[in-house]
Structures are given as structure tokens and as C-alpha cells.
Image: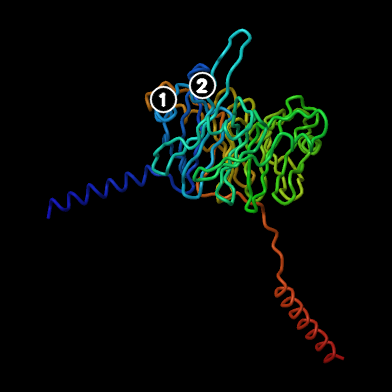
């Protein structure tokens, strides 16, 4: 009997330990880049933060290297998304220097998948991504990665400037939006660079942005629908009017939670709130609000943005290489994970890792969707008409009695 009790106790602890290690709804997953390494030896870690702010390393740099077989695995300007089964998908950049004079690099990307228990595998290889883009010599998946209602993964490639649809489980990779589609919409001489985040709503509409480094006129937010095709949701001038700043930088994340929240890493260093149905935009979280929380001299919103099911937002700020996660709750900011906490965490792991937020983040168990405007059904209208009729009859009757 004692032996059986001991066995059951061991099993219980094993189950509890396993449950604690697994990903769960509400957990925040963050791509953390190693600022200690050189360009040809980049490292990436996937951090897990539970709703109480407790930290754990979900995927280590060593695990990533073992799967890719490469020493250079960067999560700088890369994407992360979580499916409804709790699998974490994230892209990596693999940059090889091919010439130092003049300095030239060769860009490839891959996508890895981690199951809720942390089992890591390669989901899409660089060769598979290249094969999906006719004539492509390089591929560079940027900040955009999101799941659609069809269960497929949507990503952006800044080399071909196209939006790719990747089925899960993996099937034929197709292009949903091409560079020629964008050029036809923007007009002559556009500066096209798809470095932004991506969001997909419950209807399959895709939201993404163009990052015009020349700040001419092409810093716009797009909306794509299978029925209506590609359109400009929000213009550069609308963003300028909302922020009061001319210099715009949309090569950062976005998330859709009723409202489309878009990071602007330009002069405003702010979060924009965009109405997904008509493109109206306003400055939602200012740089001052972010610095009030972090205590830094400024903001550098390079670390992604995520939303939970309680309506909170999480912002990855990397000002002066000081990584902070800012919590936005009821339009007010506070620190969720401080730079000191994250630096001490990686230091305690005993690895040479200087954490920086330069990639993406996502909360498990969250579906992106546009806000629904409640409307009355035909039966609701009939019921309201009847109610108004009864009230009117009572009022008239009372007046008649008084008379």
C-alpha cells in the first residue's frame, strides 16, 4: 500500500510539473533576441510570461539551433502567432554575409513550430518558402504573422513584397497579395516595403501596412478581402493628422482586437487605433504614456504588440536596448515585465544572453476580430414596434380618462 501511495505521489508531482511547463490560455509568448552576438551568430529565445508576470524560457537558443542546424537564428523583425490548439509558430531570419566590400548579405527565413509542451520542429524551410515565390532569390519574413479563420497562417515577405498563405498542416503555399497588386493601387513610383505586422479578422479580411522609408506618401494601412480585393484603409495623411508627426515608421507590429492597433515607430513612437471598417485613425497610446511607465528617455516600439481576452494590450519597448513590456489597461500604461526582471532572468539561466525585444509577441487563446455593431433582427424590430404601440395605447387611454 505504501509503495502504491509513493508511486501515485510521484505521478501526481509529474503531472503537476508537466502542467506548469505547458503553454496555457492567457500566456504571453515573446521573441527575445540576443544583443551579445555578432551578425553571423545571432540567437533567439522564446519567452513565456504567465498572466501573473512569472517568466520561463519556453524555447531556448540551443533548441532552435538544433532544429535549424544553423548558428545564426535571428528574431529581429520577425513574426510569432499561436493557433487555437496552442501551437506556437514563429519565423527566424538567417542572414549570411557574402561580401564585405561592398557589404552584401543573403537573406533567408524559416518558420518553426512549438507544441504546447515545448516540442520544437521546423514547419517551413527556407527552400519551401523560396519555391512558393516565382523567381525569388531571397526571402525575408518580417513582423507580420497571423492565423486566419480558415486555420491558415498568413505572413509577409519583404523581398517579394507579397502576402503568403501557408496551410496548417503544411500544404501548397500561395500568394494572396503581390507587389504588382500594391503598385497598381499606389500609383506610379511607389516605395513598397512590406515590413509591417499582419492581422486577419473573423471574415478573412487581411490588414497590413506599407513602410515607405522615404516618407513620401506610401506609409499606408491596407485591407484585403477576397470579395473586394486590395484597398487603402488608412492613408499617410490621416496618420499625420492623427499624430501631428510627419516621419512615420510602420515596420513594426499590429494586432486586431475589435479595433486595429498599429505601432508607429516613427517620431511619435506611439500606438494608433484604427477602425477596421472605415480606416479612421487616432493616436491611442502616446510616447509620454510609455515613458511614464518605463522611466526611459524615449520609446522604441520594436518588440511587437499583443492583446489578451480581457482587452489589455502588451507592448514590447526596446529603448536604448532596455527591454520592457508595457501593459495597457483601460488606456493607461504600467510595467508588466521590466528590463531588470528580464535581464536578471536570462542572467540566472547562466547563458551569455543580452535580451532585446526586436521581434513579435502573442497571447495564447486569442482570436483576432473586428468589433461587431449590434443590430436588431426583423423579429426584434417587430417586438419593438409592438412595445411602442402598447405604450402609445396606454398614454392615449390615460389622456382619454382624464378628459
User: For residue 129, what is the image quadrant?
Assistant: top right
Q: Nearer the viewer, mark 1 or mark 2?
A: 2
Q: CA distance from mark 1 to mark 2?
A: 13 Å
Q: Quadrant of the N terminus?
A: bottom left
User: For residue 315, what is the image quadrant?
Assistant: top right
Give the vertical position of 290 relative to 320 (above or below): below
Residue in front for this viewpoint, 222 or 288:
222
Helix, strand, or loop for circle 2? loop
Q: Residue at x 77, y 81 (%)?
A: 391
- Specify few, some or many for label 1: CA neighbours under 10 Å numbering under 14, 14-19, or 20 or more: some
Residue 347, which numbered label?
1
Mark sitting earlier along the chain (1/2): 2
Helix, strand, or loop for circle 1? helix
Q: Residue at x 52, y 31 (%)?
A: 110
Q: Quadrant of the C terminus?
A: bottom right
Is the image coloured rainbow, by chain, by secondary structure, or in one colour? rainbow
Q: Position of residue 26 (x, y in %)?
A: 49, 47
Q: Position of residue 292 (x, y in %)?
A: 62, 33
Q: Please give the residue where the numbered disc 2 appears in the rendered image.
A: 35
- Label count reads 2
| Left or right placement of residue 380 versus residue 2 in this view | right
| Left or right placement of residue 10 versus residue 359 in this view | left
Q: Residue at x 58, y 20 (%)?
A: 106
Q: Residue at x 54, y 29 (%)?
A: 109
Give the vertical position of 18 relative to 213 (above or below): below
Residue 383, which numbered label?
none
Marks 1/2 in contact by CB < 8 Å: the verdict is no
- Specify few, some or many for label 2: CA neighbours under 10 Å numbering under 14, 14-19, or 20 or more: some
Q: Position of residue 306 (x, y in %)?
A: 57, 41
Give the vertical position of 43 relative to 30 (above or below): above
Amino acid at each position: 500500500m505504501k509503495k502504491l501511495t509513493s508511486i501515485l505521489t510521484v505521478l501526481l508531482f509529474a503531472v503537476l510539473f508537466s502542467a506548469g511547463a505547458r503553454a496555457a490560455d492567457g500566456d504571453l509568448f515573446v521573441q527575445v533576441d540576443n544583443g551579445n552576438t555578432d551578425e553571423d551568430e545571432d540567437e533567439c529565445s522564446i519567452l513565456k510570461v504567465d498572466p501573473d508576470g512569472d517568466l520561463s524560457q519556453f524555447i531556448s537558443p540551443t533548441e532552435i539551433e538544433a532544429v535549424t542546424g544553423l548558428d545564426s537564428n535571428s528574431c529581429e523583425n520577425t513574426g510569432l502567432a499561436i493557433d487555437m490548439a496552442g501551437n506556437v509558430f514563429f519565423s527566424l531570419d538567417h542572414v549570411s554575409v557574402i561580401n564585405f566590400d561592398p557589404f552584401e548579405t543573403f537573406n533567408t527565413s524559416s518558420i518553426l513550430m512549438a507544441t504546447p509542451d515545448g516540442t520544437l520542429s521546423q514547419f517551413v524551410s527556407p527552400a519551401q518558402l523560396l519555391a512558393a515565390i516565382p523567381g525569388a532569390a531571397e526571402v525575408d519574413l518580417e513582423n507580420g504573422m497571423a492565423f486566419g479563420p480558415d486555420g491558415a497562417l498568413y505572413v509577409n515577405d519583404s523581398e517579394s513584397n507579397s502576402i503568403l498563405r501557408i496551410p496548417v498542416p503544411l500544404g501548397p503555399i500561395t500568394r494572396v497579395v503581390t507587389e504588382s497588386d500594391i503598385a497598381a493601387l499606389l500609383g506610379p513610383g511607389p516605395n513598397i516595403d512590406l515590413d509591417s505586422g499582419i492581422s486577419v479578422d473573423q471574415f478573412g479580411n487581411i490588414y497590413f501596412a506599407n513602410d515607405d522609408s522615404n516618407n513620401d506618401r506610401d506609409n499606408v494601412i491596407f485591407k484585403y478581402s477576397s470579395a473586394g480585393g486590395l484597398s487603402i484603409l488608412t492613408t499617410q495623411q490621416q496618420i499625420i493628422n492623427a499624430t501631428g508627426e510627419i516621419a512615420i515608421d510602420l515596420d513594426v507590429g499590429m494586432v486586431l482586437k475589435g479595433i486595429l492597433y498599429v505601432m508607429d515607430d516613427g517620431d511619435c513612437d506611439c500606438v494608433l487605433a484604427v477602425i477596421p471598417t472605415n480606416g479612421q485613425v487616432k493616436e491611442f497610446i502616446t510616447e509620454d504614456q510609455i515613458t511614464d511607465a518605463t522611466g526611459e528617455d524615449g520609446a522604441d516600439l520594436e518588440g511587437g504588440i499583443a492583446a489578451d481576452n480581457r482587452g489589455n494590450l502588451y507592448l514590447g519597448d526596446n529603448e536604448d536596448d532596455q527591454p520592457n513590456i508595457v501593459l495597457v489597461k483601460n488606456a493607461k500604461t504600467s510595467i508588466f515585465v521590466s528590463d531588470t526582471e528580464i535581464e536578471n532572468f536570462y542572467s540566472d539561466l547562466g547563458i551569455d544572453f543580452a535580451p532585446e525585444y526586436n521581434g513579435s509577441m502573442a497571447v495564447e487563446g486569442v482570436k483576432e476580430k473586428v468589433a461587431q455593431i449590434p443590430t436588431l433582427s426583423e423579429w426584434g424590430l417587430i417586438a419593438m414596434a409592438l412595445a411602442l404601440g402598447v405604450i402609445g395605447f396606454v398614454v392615449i387611454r390615460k389622456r382619454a380618462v382624464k378628459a
